[in-house]
Amino acid sequence: MNESRAIATLALFAVGLLGGVVVHAFLDKGPAENPYPALPKVDEPRAAHDIVAAVGADDAQALSRMLDSTMLTDLDAAIQPIVDVRTTKFVGAVESEGKLLSAYVVTGKTAEGIDFVVGFVLRVSNDQVVGVN
Amino acid sequence: MVGLKRLISGSAGTVLVGVLAGFVIASAGGIFIQDSGLFGASGESPIARTYMLALLKRDPNSIVGIRPNQSIAQRAAEIQNADTSRTTGDIQPLSLTYIGGASVGAYSVHIYAVGLRTAQGVDQFFPLALTVYGGKVRRSE
């Protein structure tokens, strides 16, 4: 008797579980359709890779050789409020008429010790990083 | 009669708990799949996409619910700017590309590349990174 009751309870729970998944699938519509053309992705440019590697390695010396003071200021603004970088991740790059945008996500901690995530983009032209957003 | 009532309410409770668990599991699984890019998922947030489309269509009213609250003066200025740019037709969107994103806890970042043509016929190509938290776009830069 107890065994059949337990099986019935589990079966009801499983039915509910399935129902929950179906309800979620029904409510989760996904992003709206993009009416504009999307550009194809390209490989990560070498120059951008080197800069982000220096950020990930906390290598201020190398970074100081690769970016001018304006771009360093822009980079500082772009990764605010993170002060302690833990990870860097290349998420993709796109190109339009020779201008390349290489996008990264940085995770780390704020000055208050809170885990945070920010995104920034390096502009690349003629195999050189020419800007930070 | 009391036994039957107890049986029905107990069963309904079990199903309800199952539904809630299923919803939470599906939701968490969906976020994981989106972030990891498994099964071809782009990881793009519907909120971020809606925000970007409203920006390109210059329709600030449609994103009131998914961005931080603004003062009445800020909202009025935004509507004024959108009306002006619509009237003069000063920009023409050329492309909108979702480059990628990632999540940490409740925060997620979504990065786009936007192509525009100005009224002077100059093509512009620039990125925009959106930070989404609590169902709203908290930061756009």
Image (cartoon, coloured by chain):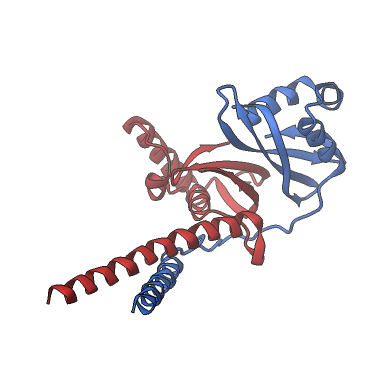
Where B16 falls versus A49 (above or below)?
below
Which residue shows up at 80% across the image and 40% down it? Answer: A124
Which residue shows up at 77% across the image and 33% down it? Answer: A56
Q: Residue A98: horizontal and vertical position, in percent?
A: 81, 47
Q: Is residue B131 left or right of residue A128?
A: left
**Quarter containing the N terminus of chain A:** bottom left
Name chain A's colour: blue
Chain depicted in red: B
Which residue shows up at 85% across the image and 21% down it? Answer: A61
Image quadrant assignment for residue A108: top right
Q: Residue B29: horizontal and vertical position, in percent?
A: 54, 60
Where A108 falls versus A3 (above or below)?
above
A50 or A5, which lies in front? A5
B36 or A125, which lies in front? B36
How many numbered marks appear?
Answer: 0
Q: Is residue A105 left or right of residue B109?
A: right
Image quadrant assignment for residue A100: top right
Where B25 falls versus B135 (above or below)?
below
- The single residue placed furthest to the front in the displayed view is A1
**Quarter containing the C terminus of chain A:** top right
Is any part of residue B111 visible from this angle? no
Q: Residue A101: horizontal and vertical position, in percent?
A: 74, 44
